[in-house]
Amino acid sequence: MASQKKVLIPCGSITLEGLLEMPEPDENSPQGALIIHPHPLFGGNMHNNVTSALADGLVAHGVATLRFNFRGVGASGGSHGGGVDEIDDVLAAISFLDTLQDLDCSNLILAGYSFGCWVGLKAASFQNRRMRLIGVSPPVDMYDFSFLFNEKRPKLLLAGTYDFVCSVRNFLELASKIPDPKSVVTLENTDHFHFGKEDRIVSETLHFLNL
């Protein structure tokens, strides 16, 4: 049976609250995935509909997932850092996953949604480890994603055709500048929030990961 456990993640002088979900046990250690929530100042937290759907879908297919609240959200310490200090939050969560001996994080899955996509993929750019990167609704109309221009690890990018912070034109222009391997998916008739359409994100993610 799958299990869920609240965890505390050390991050410098503060602690972040997280939620670790383990799949049904089998003879192999499960792969590890980190799922990163959208903007804290606009109601984003680790229980967001997209991050929750990704966690449920991955756990159901044998992947262990860690979600966490950015600093200043829920029971996490500190205060919002404008996307700069939040990079440290992501790196702390990766380090926490590495301490879990019953997980296989040798080819970590990192998935971020909206603000969490920008911060998460940027944090990943500071690490040379093997990773598979998933960006849902990258807010390309608001933030600089040029750090992806040299990103050669496997990437999946998804955005809705009605996304108000990820216009199709800018999304496809960004994708054209990112090196392979990459998968780029536009979700028809879908806006930034994906309410009621989370299953499409999950199915594309599972396909990308060959799960």
Image (cartoon, rainbow, N blue to C red):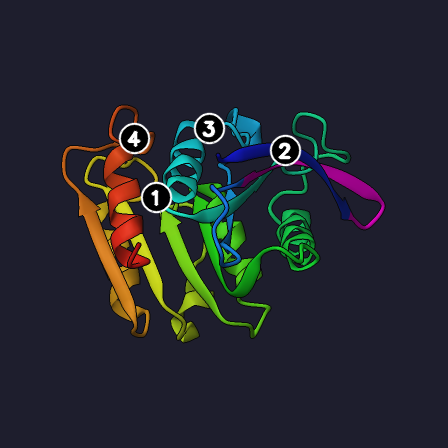
Percent coordinates x, y for residue 154 in the rendering: 36, 68
- Give SS at disc 1: loop
- Three-letter residue code for mark 1: Ser
Task: Kindly identify which residue carries mark 1.
Answer: 137
Query: Of discs 2 and 3, which sits in the foreground?
Result: 2
Could you give the CA–CA distance between mark 4 and mark 2, rounded to whole angstroms? 27 Å
Determine the residue positioned at 30% across, 25% down: 195
- Three-letter residue code for mark 4: His
Q: Badge 2, how many Cα within 10 Å: few under 14, some, many 20+?
A: few
Look at the picture and state if 47 lies above or below 111. above
Mark 1 and mark 4 residues within 8 Å of each other at the beta carbon = yes
State yes or no: residue 86 in magenta.
Answer: no
Task: Kindly identify which residue carries mark 2.
Answer: 5
Q: Main secondary structure of the magenta part?
A: strand
Labelled disc at residue 39: none
* Residue situated in front as seen by the camera: 83 or 75: 75
- Sequence-first disc among 2 and 1: 2
State yes or no: residue 15 in magenta.
Answer: yes
Percent coordinates x, y for residue 176 in the rendering: 24, 67
- Give SS at disc 4: loop
In the image, 120: left or right of 11? left
Percent coordinates x, y for residue 12 in the rendering: 81, 50
Residue range in magenta is 11-21
* Residue situated in front as seen by the camera: 29 or 90: 29
Mark 4 and mark 3 residues within 8 Å of each other at the beta carbon = no
Could you give the CA–CA distance between mark 3 and mark 1, rounded to whole angstroms? 14 Å
Query: Of discs 3 and 1, which sits in the foreground?
Result: 3
Residue reaching furthest left?
A: 188
- Give SS at disc 2: strand
- Sequence-first disc among 2 and 3: 2
- Sequence-first disc among 4 and 3: 3
- Three-letter residue code for mark 2: Lys
